[in-house]
Amino acid sequence: MSNWDIAKISNFIEQEIAAGHLPGAVLYIAQRGKEVVKQAYGSRVMYPEAAPMSVDTVFDLASLTKVVATLPAVLQLMDQGKLTLADPIGRFLPQFLFSQEEPIRIEHLLTHSSGLRADIPGMRGLMHLSRDELVDLILNERPLHPPGTKVVYSDIGLILLYLIIESVTGEAFDTYLKREIFEPLEMTETGFCPTFAETRYAVTEFSEQRQAYKAGIVHDEKAELMHGVSGHAGLFSTVHDVANYAEMIRQKGVFKGRRVISRAAIELSSRNFTPYDQEFRGLGWLLRNPRNFLFGGDYVSEQSFGHTGFTGTSLLFEPEQDLQIIFLTNRVHFGRTEHILQIRPRLHNLILSQIQ
C-alpha cells in the first residue's frame, strides 16, 4: 500500500525549478500497472521566451535511446536466433579492424565492458566530419582494457551495436525500430529526426554552430553527425510513450496481450553481468550495487534497475514495489550543470518513502 502525497512531490520539483536547476519537467509514476501521477512542471523553453511544459511535450531522450531503442532491438534479434551475446562483433562488422585473442562480443557492448573508451575526445571540434568519417573513426577504435574486465560507460560501444543491428536486419535502424518496437507498443510519437511543430519540444542547449537553441534537433554531437540516428542517442519521445515501453518491461515483454520480446530476454537483461566491477551492469541497464545506486536513491531494492540520459531524462524500475518512475527534463537548456545528479536520487527517495 502507498499513501501518495503528490503535493509534496510536486513541491520538491517546483523548488528545483525555482532554484534555476531545471527549466521544467514531466513526472510519471506507476505502481502495480496503474498510473499514480502524470504531471508537467515549469517551462519547456526559457530562451528567448518562456513557454510552459505539458505532459505531451516531446523530449530528446539522449542515452535513454540505449535502453528504449537499441536494447529491445538486440533482444528481439536474440529471440529470432540471429545473434547471441557470445558472438564476436567481427562476425557482423568485419571492417572493425581490432582483433585479439579475446574478442569484443555483443555482451561486452551491452554491458559497457568492451574495453573501449567512453567517447571520442573533442567532439565539439570534430563537427566538420561526415557521418562516414565518424563511423570510420569508431571502426578503428582499440580497447584500452581487455574485454570483460572493467566497466567503462561507452557511447562508442552502442554505436557499434547500431551498426550491427543494421547489418543483421539489412535495413535502416529507425525503420526496423518503428515497425518492430514502437508500433507494437503504440509509441506513436517516438522516433528519430522528429517533425513535430516547434512548440512541442523541450528545448535543449544553445548551439554555437547553429546560433540557436536546439528544438527537435538531437543534442548529442555524435548523433547529430550521424544525421540524428544512432544507437547511443537520438531518440525523441513523450512520457506517454516511454510509459508504454516501461509497461512492456514490467509485463516481461508483453504489451496489451501482445508479446513483443520474450520473457527470457527481459529477465536476462536485468541480471548482473559485471560482478567484477563496482558498477553493476545488466544488458543496457544500470543496476543497484551493494554500496549505492548512482541515480536510484537510497531506498531502492537490489532488484532495481534503470537508465539516465544526458539531457536530463531517466527511467527507474523498482520491481519489489512494482513501481516505475519516469522523470523527463531538459536540464541542458541551462547548460551542462550537474544539479540533475543530486535531484534524481533525492526525488526517488521522496517517492519511495511514501510506500507503506
Image (cartoon, helix red, strand yellow):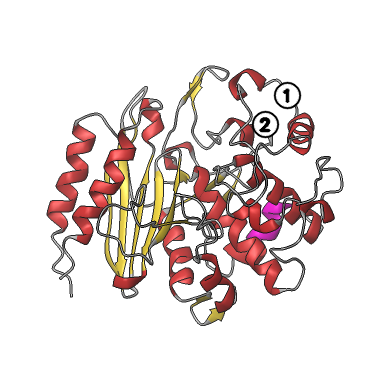
User: Residue at image x 74%, y 48%?
Assistant: 163
Report x, y in % for residue 34.
31, 73
Quadrant location of the N terminus?
bottom left
Q: Nearer the viewer, residue 87 or 229?
A: 87
Overall secondary structure of the magenta section: helix
Question: In the figure, residue 7 lies in which quadrant?
Answer: bottom left
The mark found on residue 225 in the picture is: 2
Task: Characterize the local packing of mark 2: few (<14), some (14-19) or many (20 or more) Cα atoms within 10 angstroms.
Answer: many
State the residue at coordinates (31%, 65%).
Answer: 301
At x 59% / y 56%, what residue is drawn?
A: 69
Helix, strand or loop at label 2? It is helix
Given the image, on which type of amino acid does mark 1 rest? Leu
Queried whether the magenta region covers residue 176, the answer comes back as yes
Q: Magenta includes 288?
A: no
The residue singled out by tag 1 in the image is 129
Marks 1 and 2 in Cβ contact (< 8 Å): yes
Q: Earlier in the sequence, mark 1 or mark 2?
A: 1
Residue 149, horizontal then vertical, whole percent: 60, 49
Specify whether 36 is left or right of 3. right
Question: Looking at the picture, which amino acid does disc 2 mark?
Answer: Leu
Res 269 label:
none
Left or right, 87 with respect to 182, comes to right
In the rendered image, the vertical position of residue 118 relative to residue 232, given as above or below = above
Residue 298 lies left or right of residue 58; in this view the side is: left
Q: Which residues are magenta?
A: 172-178
